[in-house]
Image (tube, rainbow, N blue to C red):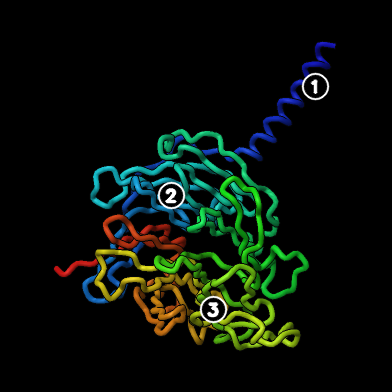
Amino acid sequence: MNTALTILFSFILIACSSKQSADNPSKEETVDQTGLTSTEGLRLDEIHLPEGFKIDVFARVNNARSLVLTENGTLFVSNRGGDKVYAIKDTDGDWKADEKYVIASDMRMPNGIAFKDGSLYVAEVSKLWRFDNIEENLANPSVPVKIYDDYPTDGHHGWKFIAFGPDGKLYVPVGAPCNICESKNEMYASITRMNADGSNREVYVHGVRNTVGFTWHPETGEMWFTDNGRDWMGNDMPPCELNRVTEPGQHFGYPYCHGGYIKDPEFGHKYPCDDFEKPAQNLGPHVAPLGVKFCTSEAFPSEYKNKIFIAEHGSWNRDADVGHTGHKITMVTEQNGEGVAYEDFATGFLDKEANTAWARPVDLVFATDGSMLVSDDLAGTVFRITYSLD
């Protein structure tokens, strides 16, 4: 009888332990701090920037993806190819990282992170977590609170970019589960939003193939988002997009219309392109635009104020003889909600002769001193771009 009870309790403990592991992402106890600002493998001298700007290394972080910088100076960095979320600290104010912490591990593509009221929010493919009082507990984060777990589990375009809007709601996109398809579930190919506690989730806008970056205009409060164009329509079609949301419920064309004027060869016959919202700015083909921010830096020259910076992750399916697109940081100048100029800001992450990238920009944020921090998931780096007249 005692043996039977022992076996029974052992099974219960194993089951409970497995459930706790699934619902409570774990973290590593220690992190190797060596090489935290190493320039090994980086080709910084090949980066081309406008006159007066320079680029350096703030931190090395494996597969660095989304960035969140708090008012206290903690930089949270997610990754997609790995399973972790990191915190980076510059403790002596020299804008070089000194400390790195693992906030969470064993997570499924934790690309999306956001920060509100002292809590870090992390998005897996289908779940959202909240780490409370996180900056006071970087070395030993508390058990996270699961606030939502009903997003699709598809891996295709399943990773998330998340952010809090001016309305205090958490915005969460759901990519299309395919290259091109119609979905009966209206949650696919959309941007959703919910309260900070996970309640009252709703679809905010439709027809968004895969956005991995959005922000809000510092003056109008309108959302602007990047969208990755579909594949296999040729080397130069369709364009990727920068879009502006003016009201909830808008539809931005996917899967029927691309770039505001190109009918999809499979689904385009169903609706005219005029039925959908037009992009504020068409970007290059297959550039894979991800992070996007309006320039709020007081340290950049005045002509950069409110310019829209975009991290273009870069193409993967263009023919070798025509070469890759993207792999750079670009700028869009907008007037009255429309793009009037689209130009390069930082190039050189792609070796055009070899058609091989050594770094791929993902996200960007502006720091308190006005510098720009840029993540890169290929070389595993957070770059720092500054401006000086010297």
Quadrant hosting residue 390: bottom left
Q: Does 208 sit left or right of 333 as displayed?
A: right
- Residue 137: x and y in percent read 43, 35
What residue did someone put label 1 on? 8
Q: Nearer the viewer, residue 221 or 53?
A: 221
What residue did someone put label 2 on? 76
Q: Which mark is residue 240?
A: 3
Looking at the rendered structure, the secondary structure element under dot 2 is: strand
Front: mark 3 or 1? 3
- Tell me what residue is drawn at x 28 percent, y 76 percent: 303
Quadrant hosting residue 299: bottom left
Query: Mark 3 Cα within 10 Å, few/some/many (few <14, many 20+)?
Result: many
The mark that comes first in sequence, 3 or 2, is 2
| Three-letter code for the amino acid on which mark 3 is drawn | Cys
* Mark 3 → mark 1, Cα distance in angstroms: 57 Å
Q: Nearer the viewer, residue 216 or 380?
A: 216
| Three-letter code for the amino acid on which mark 1 is drawn | Leu
Quadrant hosting residue 145: top right
Front: mark 1 or 2? 2
The mark that comes first in sequence, 3 or 1, is 1
Res. 344 visible in picture: yes
| Three-letter code for the amino acid on which mark 2 is drawn | Phe
- Residue 244: x and y in percent read 52, 74
Looking at the rendered structure, the secondary structure element under dot 3 is: strand
Query: Mark 1 Cα within 10 Å, few/some/many (few <14, many 20+)?
Result: few
